[in-house]
């Protein structure tokens, strides 16, 4: 018999080396996540995949599953914390959904819908983050960056280019482009790169296709993210 | 108790730094308007042209806070309304008007009133009647306590009706997929 742990009271089998999130997904249980992607090692920065194990809060994307552990995920307490994390992400950047090309396809927004983040509670930072339109095929709108490093990882580990990096620390952290001018147009970045399609929010946008699919009929307009995400699992 | 004797819910609405799009969407509840007028009495609102708020049960605020007058109106609503509701993206996070927040106010005014062709001679308006602008446009929850929010730009008539009818009937108003939208 394989090893198992309890996920919201239900037994979930796992193999050694699997994280809580991997095992839960394989068993059909959704855990919200932003910086985690099935093709990349865990990053553990967004904390949306937070779960409670033995009274402790852990990132389920990074925590190895262990025999007999009791994991709480879809509970009012944990979902409340996830909602607070989303509210913090929304005020840290400039997330103005009505003017964003990614609206309806954005994972940050879709998670806010899923976790019913109807209002805000923190004061907005309104940071000044100019856009970079220098590349012929791709626009960078830094206003929406959540520092998940998926573009950094995709460019470095898949495309072999190291186009992106995060610089500075803590609240002063921001996304930079690896060129002397700091402009995407002066790198070897291409629209066909893996990094061009990895952004969970609306930072990396292909030009000339923005509203090809109208707002209101996009991925998460039609289906909530927990259903879309589990469907894409295989 | 007859319908006439039953006290109607008093409802006030206003648009601060908004475009009245949320009010237009409010009117988009179409035939529900007939149900609504049976349930509510409108107080201060662009629909009644009443200039000041009496004690109300519900206040709907569209738009963010961009000038001193917005602050006064918003505080009047908070003081008079038992339940204050932020309606639309601008009231919730500043919205479109808040897109000026990373531009210094003076540069913004010069760009509009001095640098633009055809407006060069007029200069920045400086009439004491004009409310002073704030350096940044703020969502209303940064100025007063807000009880509920109805997101959307604008929220659909359907979402507004769902919310209002629930609130008036004493049910906990709740918007979820597919009625919960930020765009």
Image (cartoon, rainbow, N blue to C red):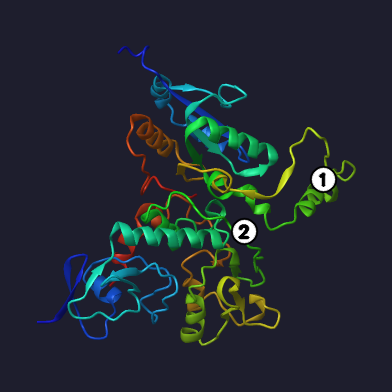
Q: Chain of mark 1?
A: B
Q: Are the residues under badges 2 and 1 in a single subunit? A: no
Judge depth for marks 2 and 1 and give the one in front: 2
Instruction: Tell whether B140 sits left or right of B167.
Output: right
Q: Is residue A112 above or below residue B68?
A: below
Instruction: Tell whether A154 sits left or right of B113.
Output: left
- Residue A191 showing in the rendered view: yes
Which quadrant would residue B160 be assigned to in this image? Answer: top left
Q: Estimate the x, y position of residue A221 in percent, counting from the top left.
A: 40, 52
Q: Estimate the x, y position of residue A69 in percent, counting from the top left.
A: 21, 75
- Residue A141 showing in the rendered view: no
Which quadrant would residue A14 be assigned to in this image? Answer: bottom left
Residue shown at the point (52%, 28%) measured from the top left: B12
Q: Residues within 10 Å of mark 1 (few under 14, many from 20)?
A: some
Q: Which of the labelled discs sits on residue A33, or is there none?
A: none
Tell me the element at label 1.
helix
Q: Chain of mark 2?
A: A
Question: Disc 2 marks which residue?
Answer: A126
**Quadrant of the rendering where the C terminus of chain A is positioned:** bottom left
Question: Disc 1 marks which residue?
Answer: B113
Q: Is residue B130 above or below residue B42?
A: below
């Amino acid at each position: 018999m394989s090893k198992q742990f309890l996920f919201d009271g239900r037994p979930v089998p796992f193999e050694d080396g699997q994280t809580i999130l991997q095992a839960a997904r394989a068993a059909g249980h959704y855990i919200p996540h932003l910086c985690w992607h099935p093709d990349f090692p865990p990053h553990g920065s967004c904390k949306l995949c937070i779960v409670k194990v033995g009274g402790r809060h852990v990132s389920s994307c990074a925590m190895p599953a262990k025999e007999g552990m009791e994991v709480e995920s879809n509970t009012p307490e944990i979902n409340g914390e996830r909602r607070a994390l989303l509210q913090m992400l929304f005020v840290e950047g400039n997330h103005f959904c009505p003017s964003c090309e990614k609206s309806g396809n954005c994972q940050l927004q879709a998670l806010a819908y899923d976790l019913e983040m109807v209002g805000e509670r923190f004061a907005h930072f309104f940071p000044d983050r100019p856009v970079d339109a220098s590349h012929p095929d791709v626009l960078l709108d830094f206003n929406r960056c959540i520092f998940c490093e998926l573009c950094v990882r995709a460019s470095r580990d898949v495309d072999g280019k190291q186009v992106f990096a995060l610089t500075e620390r803590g609240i002063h952290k921001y996304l930079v482009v690896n060129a002397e001018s700091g402009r995407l147009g002066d790198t070897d970045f291409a629209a066909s790169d893996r990094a061009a399609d990895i952004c969970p929010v609306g930072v990396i946008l292909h030009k000339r296709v923005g509203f090809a699919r109208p707002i209101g009929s996009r991925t998460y307009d039609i289906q909530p993210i927990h259903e879309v995400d589990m469907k894409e699992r295989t | 108790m007859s319908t006439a004797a039953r006290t109607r819910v008093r409802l006030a609405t206003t648009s601060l730094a908004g475009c009245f799009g949320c009010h237009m969407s409010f009117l988009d509840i179409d035939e529900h308007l007939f149900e609504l007028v049976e349930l509510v009495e409108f107080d201060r609102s662009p629909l009644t042209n009443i200039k000041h708020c009496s004690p109300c049960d519900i206040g709907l605020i569209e738009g963010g806070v961009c000038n001193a007058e917005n602050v006064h109106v918003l505080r009047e609503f908070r003081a008079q309304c038992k339940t204050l509701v932020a309606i639309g993206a601008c009231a919730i996070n500043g919205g479109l008007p808040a897109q000026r927040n990373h531009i210094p106010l003076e540069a913004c005014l010069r760009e509009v009133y001095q640098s633009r062709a055809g407006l060069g001679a007029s200069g920045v308006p400086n009439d004491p009647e004009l409310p002073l602008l704030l350096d940044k446009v703020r969502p209303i929850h940064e100025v007063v306590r807000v009880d509920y929010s109805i997101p959307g730009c604008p929220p659909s008539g359907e979402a507004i009706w769902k919310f209002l009818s629930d609130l008036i009937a004493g049910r906990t108003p709740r918007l979820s997929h597919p009625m919960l939208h930020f765009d």
